[in-house]
Image (cartoon, grey):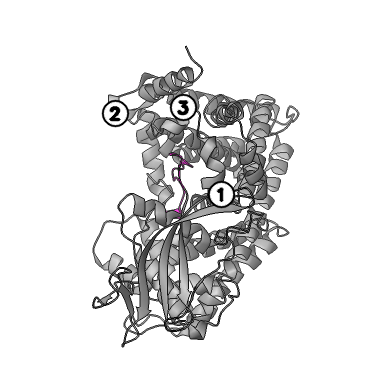
Amino acid sequence: MSVAGGPHWLLQGLQQRLSPAVGRSTLGAACVTAILLLTTCTMLYESVYCMGVYEAYVVAERTRVSIHVMCILAFLSLRWQLPGLCGTSGIIPAGNRIAEMRNLLSRGLELPRVSETMIRAEIITHAWMRGEKWPPALERKPDHDVFTTRLVMLCDIGLCSALAGIFLPFPLSTLSLALCWFAYWVLKRSCGTFLNLQWDQLLLECSALGCALSVPPLRLGAVWSLRMLLFKLVLSSGLCKVLSGCPKWSSLTAMDYHFWTQPLPTIIGYHLNRRLTPRLSRLMVWFTLFVQVFPVPWLLLLPYPLGAVGVWWIVLLMILIAFTGNYGFFNYLTCALALTVPLGGTRRDDPYRLSDIIAICYGLVVGLGVTQPLLYTLDPLHPACHWASSVGHYLRPIAVGSGYGLFARMTTFRMELNFEAEVSPGGPWREIVFKHKPVDPTNPPYFLPIGHMPRLDWRLWFVPLGLMRGAPMPTWVDTFIERMLRHEPCVVDGLLPRQAFDWAAVSRIRVVLWNYTFGNDGWARERLDTLYVASLGPRMGLVCRSPNSPDQPPTPSDSMSSSEEPLIVPLHES
């Protein structure tokens, strides 16, 4: 069998054995049973030989501090982007979410009590950000200064809580992490599509599960629930590549495209792509599947030293990803989860106590609910899926129990949506430069600050993918153009760098589609098409014209809507 045919046959066979389309999978059922048995046996073993009271305290504390540090990075990165993203004059204004949430409660839907409580808490928080007394006036528009200021203040509250929680003892440390979770949860729901990335959901899961790390009777169980989260994250990221049927993964050629098609490459990824050989490319794909499918994820369910071996492989993969691409705090958060695996330990001398039994039961039950999407992927008919679904019913309202799947289908092209401004009537068009998104081909990729996630630059990467699949232009893109034409400071100064022209002279903006690849010195690009030209109409509303029909009567854009469904949501929730 040829080298190219062997891997294709192997991955295709694995896909057929795990595919839910062929009914109940024997291999999937065996995997679910193995997860349950390994989790139970290893937790009991480690509670005796590796995770005594002191060892559990050390592992829980280092994990808790790491989660606090990740929250600090996330809030710091988001703070300066909030006014332009979801402020009153931002791209997706969040000031009117109170009406949406009140309408949700008034529909009479049978919501879980936890969900109803969380919605009411979000309504109260938004009423405070709008500067209103309780109950809020739904028909009144929020004050710009008050809402945007308090939106940033909510981020500052989460930031200060994350910073203080590192040094606070129990129970204040638990309360501080819970406050971090709530602040980020409200901000995620307020920013909509801009905070709908997988690592945003992962941070919420880590924060929610991490609240129990400081509770003495639950430490061991809390550590295991986060360990199961790491197992779900890694194995789900690998299974989605196998089950997607993507020919680039099955033929082991995915890395031929990955480095230059990912949203924000680094300079190391640029040079690695230039020196990439077919053999090295196939080796990288095999290494990815080795870490994310088998056997490395399964080592996490085994006691020391096998669990520690799996951790080092995962950390190595995260380091390689961080060197070749900018993914915000995702890599560091995954490494923080890896701290839940003990790297040694001694046999406990004290006898079992009631708190140990409670911790083990807590870890098994919550861990089962955490892995529910993964279990359902492996075998939806397994009895454990029914048990996990029952537990997940109570965990989903607090954003626990989501599915993950990174790069399930490898993108084979890179199209960029660029914007050009007409700086004078009939005058030249100047490209609008972004802080991090590739525009000027002479600027090579580079490293972003640690943990920083440029939300607008990242989200614009998804737009051409949707256009190529026949999806319409997202309404927030038109809103973004309108904000630039209105010279909104929170957008043109907060989200964009200083331009080579005066914004006051801009009368029209056109949207151009480019094809980008890595070149000899930075990027190489080819102009594909001008999608449309936009300007402000007589009533200061956004007007779009066809680039090929300049005399055609303008048609009002529907971009004024502040709520929308995301174009491509890289978050697979069950």
Residue 441 magenta-highlighted: no
Residue behind mark 3: 251
Secondary structure predominantly adopted by residues drawn in magenta: loop
Sequence order check: which comes first, mark 1 or mark 2?
2
Spatial CA distance of label 2 from label 3 is 22 Å
**Mark 3 residue type:** Ser
Q: What element carries label 3?
A: loop
Q: Are marks 1 and 2 in contact (CB under 8 Å)?
A: no
Sequence order check: which comes first, mark 1 or mark 3?
1
Q: Which residue lies furthest to the top in this view?
A: 1
Position above or below: 510 against 258: below
Position above or below: 490 against 453: below
Q: Which residue lies furthest to the bottom in this view?
A: 538
Q: Which of 207 and 267 is in front in this view?
A: 267
Rendered location of residue 143, percent (x, y): 44, 85
Q: Is residue 63 left or right of residue 115?
A: right
Rendered location of residue 100, percent (x, y): 32, 69
The magenta segment is: 397-413
For residue 230, what is the image quadrant? top right
Q: How crowded is mark 1: few (under 14 residues within 10 Å), some or many (20 or more)?
A: many
Residue behind mark 2: 21
For residue 88, what is the image quadrant? bottom left
Say which residue appears at 55% left-offset and 66% top-offset.
Answer: 434
Q: Residues within 10 Å of mark 2 (few under 14, many from 20)?
A: few
Residue 403 magenta-highlighted: yes
Position above or below: 130 against 121: below
Position above or below: 415 against 311: below
**Mark 2 residue type:** Ala
